[in-house]
Image: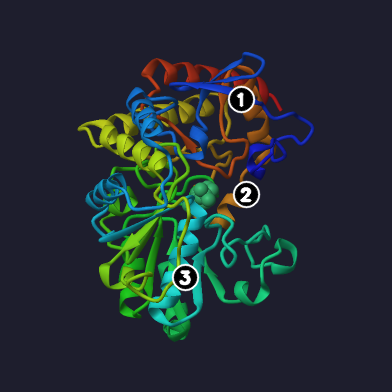
Amino acid sequence: MNSPFRGFHHVDPSKTPRIIARGDGAFMIDVDGNRYLDFLGAWGPLVLGHRHPEVTAAITQALADGWVFGTSTEIEQKMAEAVRQALPSMEMVRFVNSGAEAVQACVRLARAASRREVIVKLEGGYHGHVESLDMADPLDRPNAALSGSVKALVDRTLTVPFGDASALEVLLAERARDIAAVIVEPVPGSMGVIVPHEGYLRALREITRKHDVLLIFDEVLTGFRVAYGGAQQIWGVDPDITALGKAVGGGLPCGAYGGKRAVMERVAPVGPMYQAGTFSGNPLSMRAGLATLEVLRRPGTYERLGALTRRLCDGFERVAAAHGVAMRAPSVGGMFGMLFTAQPVRNLDDFKRCDDPAFARFFFAMLDQGFYFPPSQSDAAAVSTAHTEADIDATIEAASRALATAVAAR
Ligand code: PMP
């Protein structure tokens, strides 16, 4: 496999992962012809589901015109304008090819703009396989020797718990002169789904501003999924730099980073921070992304997506309670978690108390009934605009059976 989380090793290493052949709206079909209602959403990109007709038409047009030139194109300009309208904090935008690439550029940009080297991340935050942010150690402590990262870089990364603004305040009061940026997933999506408590994200903005430290929002997962303008729109925060990925390319490989003009003008060729890419802003991804954004910005899209997701999560919690299973299903917009725990999950420590065997039994009981979720409790699941209320209700009924037979019974 080409990315580790595609395997079933978190739920049962002895089971063979499904090999998917086709996608169809809200469904995936495997090579054996089994059909699954898709709550993986390709790990985030498929906000419109598989093969949305308007995205298909846009990609078909790009195929007719040619798919890579290595020059500037009109479509990337239109796409940059669309992103800027969606997320006004991104006054200037550059496109790359993945979320990890976008984050890596954000970190480099923060270092170039501040002339400082230390990066602060939130414990349990996932930002892609970025050298100085990828904490492979289960306690989320930098472990360069095991992960293959460069120790000197990992040593320049500090962590504080998610949700604890005073821990960040204490750290910045001591170390701000060394710190280039604080990077945060505004809705963490790799320790379940954590809904930030009211005021937390704004507190991060105030503390970083007070100590003159750049604030990076990693909206790779949340961008165009929780709201058209991302988590920064919902919680009214104005970060200095934002990373996008996943949904921004409409399902084709794409990432983007951008921010305040004064910061972005450090990027070459205007400024000295080198960042480049042969496939950056490629016409296929730009056309698919622009077509996706045009559909997503239609009135009512996020109200419907959020309502569908809440209907599902409320249903999960209702049937879990009926079967005496401790399960929580937090959601924001079209992203949600399924956490087998009685306690609210507010940070990495809370997440570690979740019951993995219970999740694994639930996962397989759902898979057997034709419902595909991320094969790990840690990862955010996704609802798309292709899902219907009937799909959601069928999922809740299946979950009730799964909880009764596979989870509560143990
Ligand atoms: N940031 C976040 C918040 C993510 O969830 C991910 C991927 N799950 C990434 C960055 C990395 O994106 P990609 O896998 O496209 O490189």
Question: Could you say where residue 356 lies in the image, as x and y percent from the top left?
Answer: 66, 40
Q: Nearer the viewer, residue 211 or 266?
A: 266
Amino acid under label 3?
Arg
- The residue tagged 2 is 353
The count of marks equals 3
> Is residue 221 rendered to the left or right of residue 260?
right
Question: Could you say where residue 221 lies in the image, as x and y percent from the top left?
Answer: 44, 47
Q: Residue at x 25, y 61 (%)?
A: 91
- The residue tagged 3 is 108
Q: Which mark is residue 328?
A: none
State the separation of the CA atoms marked 1 and 2: 32 Å
Q: Nearer the viewer, residue 84 or 94?
A: 94
Mark 2 lies on a secondary structure that is loop
The quadrant holding residue 56 is: top left
Q: Which of the marked residues, 1 or 2, is nearer the chain's N terminus?
A: 1
Q: Residue at x 56, y 72 (%)?
A: 157
Q: Is residue 226 above or below residue 106?
A: above
Amino acid under label 2?
Arg
Q: Are marks 1 and 2 in contact (CB under 8 Å)?
A: no
Residue farthest left in this picture: 299
Q: Is residue 393 above or below residue 351?
A: above
State the separation of the CA atoms marked 3 and 2: 35 Å
- The residue tagged 1 is 20
